[in-house]
Image: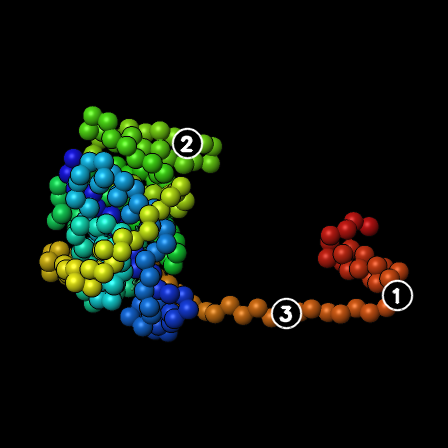
Amino acid sequence: MEKIIVCVKAVPDLRSVKVDPETHTLRRDSADLLLNPHDAPAIELAMRLKERLGVEVVVLTMGPPNASSVLRRVYSLGADRLILLSDRAFAGSDTLATSKVLAKALEKLSPFSLVLMGLKSIDGETAQVPPETAVLLGIPSVTNVRNISVENGVFILERVTDYGIEELEVAPPLVVSVTTKLDYIRPPSLKRLLKEREVEVTIWNAETLRLSQEEVGLRGSPTQVASVFEKTISSKGEIWEGPPEELSERLIELLRQKGFLKS
Ligand SMILES: Cc1cc2nc3c(=O)[nH]c(=O)nc-3n(C[C@H](O)[C@H](O)[C@H](O)COP(=O)(O)OP(=O)(O)OC[C@H]3O[C@@H](n4cnc5c(N)ncnc54)[C@H](O)[C@@H]3O)c2cc1C
């Protein structure tokens, strides 16, 4: 078995994030970043496989320079190598451009047996990146997986569906997105937590990945955000006063007018 690669997303802390009024994208440089909570199950499955197979686990993220703090936290969960894909040219990337950057980095890390990702992010929440990356790499993808084992060099995957659990056998390499709920997720190791600040984070930019400015960022993104607005909820409550019979008559009349009651 070759190495396992986990792709994680550094998501903005919703309490500190701002929207850029011109590009309509999130100002990620101004926000505190957290590990996408849905990526924790992908890290956990990688660690379970590492314990069983003794393979290296590489963790990578595409994000701004401060996303390295999120990678260091994943080190405390057991990662062996940390890679940050960061370049001003990547800013504004939609899911396709993000997947292109990830696919290029994965090609550079080849050979690998398995790429694990979260099911979805808590900010973009499209769940498109894992299958898009697999298509760009020309390898299979399986979504919403809750368990992975290996038999005779082939992965046995348990996939959660609306109707029950599907069992699939897939030969490596492949991309898997992991379900948001697992029976157990390990806490960080204290020994690793104490070392996380010293751990090296390798940084790859557009040049390292041989990506042109046209392929990534806003220019390489077919998705265009037309506008962004803050939703304001204005309460239109009314207070009715009077005897119960009169109020119930009034309520029945209102329900008739709104079409909730016939005749
Ligand atoms: C026009 C436009 C501009 C945008 N600009 C930016 C921007 O400047 N910066 C930005 O971060 N987003 C930007 N976004 C949002 C961006 O499209 C998505 O956040 C990003 O492409 C991932 O999609 P998602 O969040 O829906 O991930 P999903 O597909 O829901 O994520 C599934 C899994 O894919 C993996 N994954 C997703 N993103 C990454 C990543 N960056 N690195 C490693 N693994 C990942 C994780 O394992 C994650 O759990 C922009 C979107 C649009 C439409």
Task: State whether residue 84 is above or below residue 179.
Answer: below
Q: Are marks 2 and 3 in contact (CB under 8 Å)?
A: no
Q: Quadrant of residue 243?
A: bottom right
For residue 235, which numbered disc appears in the image? Answer: 3
Q: Nearer the viewer, residue 113 or 99?
A: 113
* Type of amino acid at the residue the image marks with label 3: Ser
Q: Position of residue 126 (x, y in %)?
A: 38, 52
Q: Quadrant of residue 123?
A: bottom left
* Type of amino acid at the residue the image marks with label 1: Pro
Q: Which residue is mark 2?
A: 165
Colour scheme in the image?
Answer: rainbow
Q: Position of residue 129 (x, y in %)?
A: 30, 49
For residue 55, which numbered disc appears in the image? Answer: none
**Lower position in the chain sequence, tag 2 or tag 1:** 2
Real-space Cα separation, disc 1 to disc 3, in angstroms? 25 Å
Q: Nearer the viewer, residue 1 or 217?
A: 1
Q: Position of residue 115 (x, y in %)?
A: 23, 43
Q: Which residue is mark 1?
A: 243
Q: Quadrant of ligand 1?
A: bottom left
Tell me the SS state at disc 3.
loop
**Lower position in the chain sequence, tag 1 or tag 3:** 3
Real-space Cα separation, disc 2 to disc 1, in angstroms? 57 Å
